[in-house]
Image (cartoon, coloured by chain):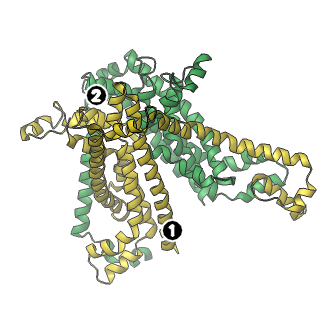
Chain colours: A yellow, B green
Amino acid sequence: MSLREPGVVVVWTDSIRPSAAPSGAGVSVRPRGREWSKLARRAVLLGVPLGYLALLLVGPLIAVVRGSLADGIPAFFDAVTSPDALHAFLMTLGMSGLAIVLNTVFGVAIAWTICRDRFVGRSLLGGLVDLPFAVSPVVVGLMAMLLFGRHGWFGPLLKQAGIKVIFSWPGMALVTTFVSLPCVVREVTPVLEEIGLGEEEAARILGASPAQTFLRVVLPNIRWGIAYGIVLTAARTLGEFGGVLLVSGGLAGKTETATLLIYRQLEERHDTSAHAVAVVLACVSITILVVMDWLKRRRDRDLRDVGS
Amino acid sequence: MTELASRPRHTRRIGALRLGVRSMVVAYLGAFVLLPLSAVLKVGFSKGLWGFAQAILTPDAIAALWLTLQTSLAMAAINALLGTWIAYALARVNFPGRTLVNALIDLPFAIPTLVTGVMLVVLFGPQSSFGLWFGEHGVRIMYARPGIVLALLFVTLPFVVRTVQPVLYEMDIANEEAAITLGASPFLAFRKVTLPGLWPAIRTGTLLSFSRALGEFGSVVIVSGNIPRRTLTAAVLIYGEIESGRPEAAAAVSAVLLAVAFMSIVLVENFQRGGLPRELA
């Protein structure tokens, strides 16, 4: 059987890539009705997912912005600059910062061990690292209580030492760090695997110390992976709620993060101010999203450079 | 043999630095992940197998676990269909604003889940125009099952889209075009040519979203209304048990959630090992 003439192929290609301009010859060959069915098909193909996204993502976003402005713009600013709100934002920033530092340092070490080290049980590390993403935040809070609470495993020990973990910031920091532990590891591991051993071995053979090799060869190669991991950690930690709710004790102006503040304001029926704080958090999230998008492109470009 | 011989010797020698990093990593993960996990399991089973069974077989716990399973399964089914649809539209159709929509998909990963719940209540709550309209027709969205499913859909949106999309990019479009050239309708070509190659990715994404949904708390606690035996999910039940001073019961239900989430992760790993290489080759 012989191949069909090329012109026909072009027309049919257009029907599954509707945006491509149909070739003049193709349009004259095809009957009119096909154009309409093509349009209808495109409308369904795009309309359903875009409508779904509008209803699920964009609609609620617009609704909460409108809700937060229900009492006017001054009320919005009063709500997000009240002492409680400012303290909550600071608290959230502090927890995120701690988690970012810990997870970056240990995350790079973990990724390096997963990629470069060889020992019995190493393959288990990957599974352990992913575990925090599979655990419900409430269960994370429970874990912290069982370990560090009054009747927990280390409870008596901590009481003797006079250290308060639960219902205080160290417990919140622990929970926040736990839930975001995989972020940096997951982003750095594929980059380390991609760049391979070549450059590192060359540096070592040419006389660089392990520390020099890491700082001047490995680190520049994985910097975008680390940056992306840090942004993910920031996103994950800013929104941490379930675990922190359990271990914080919810002391307003003391151990209250931004998400906890929203929750308390909802319970106290201060809906408008809760919505205002929620809008601020949503704005931060959207900023993070934009940064993520930019970093992803930077990283992919770097990966391509390494690959070529 | 030759491979071994050509390998530089220093990669096999264990330096002090490497040993240090290794022990640090193992100690950190052990203390941070393994220890808390064993604490939950130990406390969950502290009253023996019978005590564990009693804790998860109370009417409240059964209802909560059943509700969690139902809503997560409903979410997974919708996600599998619409997630694939979104991924296909993004990968194969050119339309104005595609870059923006593509970036929007990651929004649920960035937005705090609690804020998700708040947003959904504002839009679909009983006092909202949506809620009023649905209320007139006798459908309750918020503080009922549809609200929970909606919240889970929002929170897990990226999973299926982001696993299916790269496979579509890798896949050769020529096969689908050939099928159409040979007379298949576009839908038939998609079903018979493209879809078989997408199944592993769809399965992986759906399972990931399912295991994520099982433990979802922040958004669900806001939208569900938390009526015991009616709209109280397992994660919220765990929270309640801890707050009322029953850590053993909380740990027992947690163990069940962990087990189900763990099983779906294992399934994902199996699928990835068995399924993905064909498409990525």
Secondary element at image label 2: loop
Secondary element at image label 1: helix
Nearer mark to the viewer, of 1 and 2 = 1
- Which chain letter matches label 1? A
Q: Position of residue B251 (x, y in %)?
A: 30, 29
Q: Nearer the viewer, residue A306 or B272?
A: A306
Classify mark 1: residues with Cα within 10 Å, few (<14), some (14-19) or many (20+).
Answer: few
Q: Residue furthest bottom?
A: A206
**What is the quadrant of residue A29 in the picture?**
bottom right
Residue type at mark 1: give it: Arg
Task: Judge left or right: residue B134 versus residue B29.
Answer: right
Name the disc covering residue A207, or none.
none
Name the disc covering residue B45, or none.
2
Task: Judge left or right: residue B261 versus residue B145.
Answer: left
Q: Position of residue A176 (x, y in %)?
A: 30, 44
Q: Which residue is mark 1?
A: A301
Task: Judge left or right: residue B168 versus residue B62.
Answer: right
- Which chain letter matches label 2? B
Using the image, determine if residue B165 lies above or below residue B265: below
Q: CA distance from mark 1 to mark 2?
A: 51 Å
